[in-house]
């Protein structure tokens, strides 16, 4: 009993090929058995094509991924419906397919400004003074610092800024944060 050899049977993998009227089947597979297989989340008539494990996984991975996404979406819908039946709001089940009112977004502070309000003349004057002071402070900076801030405000990455001005990404990061802190301190009176 101790001398028994364990033989490992190599598992055969098959890729399900959906058979439709327009599917062209080569001679070697025309007599292959046809069966119903699940591809993604639907049952279809297929021929099973022999494949290696790597081929099988490469072919099926997108199908598995989509199937898993559909399962997560169905679970989220189920949880959302259950929460609605219990008359409670569950933010964990709010998703891209969830209808949300503008008022709810506004109440949660999702980033919408109240566009209907009018700035008072004093508020407008304060903003103009702050902008003038900001322009004066920016003009006092070295050309290198102005370039760094200008490129950062235009959305350039720190690495791209570094290549342009001859600094490392880390150097740009430190300098940018130091400059922004200096500007905050200098403009403190205008807040």
Image (spheres, rainbow, N blue to C red):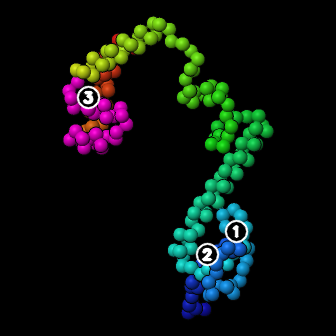
Residue at disc 2, secondary structure: strand
x and y percentages locating residue 115 in the rendered image: 56, 20
Give the residue displayed 31% in from the left and 22% down from the top: 183
x and y percentages locating residue 185 in the rendered image: 31, 19
Residue at disc 1, secondary structure: strand
Residue 149 relative to residue 88: left or right? left
Mark 2 sits on what residue? Answer: 15
Q: In whole angstroms, how far apart are the C-alphas of marks 2 and 3?
A: 59 Å
Mark 1 sits on what residue? Answer: 38
Q: In whole angstroms, how far apart are the C-alphas of marks 3 and 1?
A: 60 Å
* Nearest to N terminus: mark 3 or mark 1: 1
- Between residue 4 and residue 147, name the one nearer to us: 147
Mark 3 sits on what residue? Answer: 146
x and y percentages locating residue 142 in the rendered image: 20, 27
Q: Residues within 10 Å of mark 3 (few under 14, many from 20)?
A: some
x and y percentages locating residue 187 in the rendered image: 33, 16
Cβ atoms at labels 2 and 3 below 8 Å apart: no
Give the residue displayed 72% in from the left and 70% down from the top: 44
Q: Residues within 10 Å of mark 2 (few under 14, many from 20)?
A: some
Q: Quadrant of residue 63?
A: bottom right
Question: Dividing the image into 4 quarters, which one contains the C terminus?
Answer: top left
Give the residue displayed 26% in from the left and 28% down from the top: 146
Seen as rendered, the residue at the extreme top is 122
Q: Is residue 21 magenta?
A: no
* Nearest to N terminus: mark 2 or mark 1: 2
Q: Which residues are magenta?
A: 141-170
């Amino acid at each position: 009993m101790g001398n028994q050899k364990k033989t490992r049977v190599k598992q055969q993998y098959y890729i399900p090929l959906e058979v439709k009227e327009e599917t062209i089947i080569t001679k070697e597979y025309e007599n292959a058995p046809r069966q119903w297989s699940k591809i993604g989340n639907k049952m279809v008539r297929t021929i099973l094509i022999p494949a290696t494990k790597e081929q099988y996984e490469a072919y099926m991975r997108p199908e598995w991924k989509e199937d898993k996404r559909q399962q997560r979406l169905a679970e989220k819908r189920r949880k959302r419906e259950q929460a609605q039946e219990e008359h409670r709001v569950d933010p964990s089940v709010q998703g891209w397919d969830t209808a949300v009112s503008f008022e709810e977004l506004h109440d949660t502070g999702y980033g919408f400004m109240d566009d209907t309000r009018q700035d008072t003349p004093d508020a407008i004057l304060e903003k103009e003074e702050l902008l003038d002071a900001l322009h004066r402070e920016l003009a006092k900076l070295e050309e290198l610092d102005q370039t760094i801030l200008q490129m950062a405000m235009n959305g350039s990455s720190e690495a791209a800024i570094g290549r342009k001005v001859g600094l490392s990404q880390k150097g740009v990061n430190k300098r940018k944060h130091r400059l922004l802190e200096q500007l905050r301190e200098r403009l403190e009176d205008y807040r």
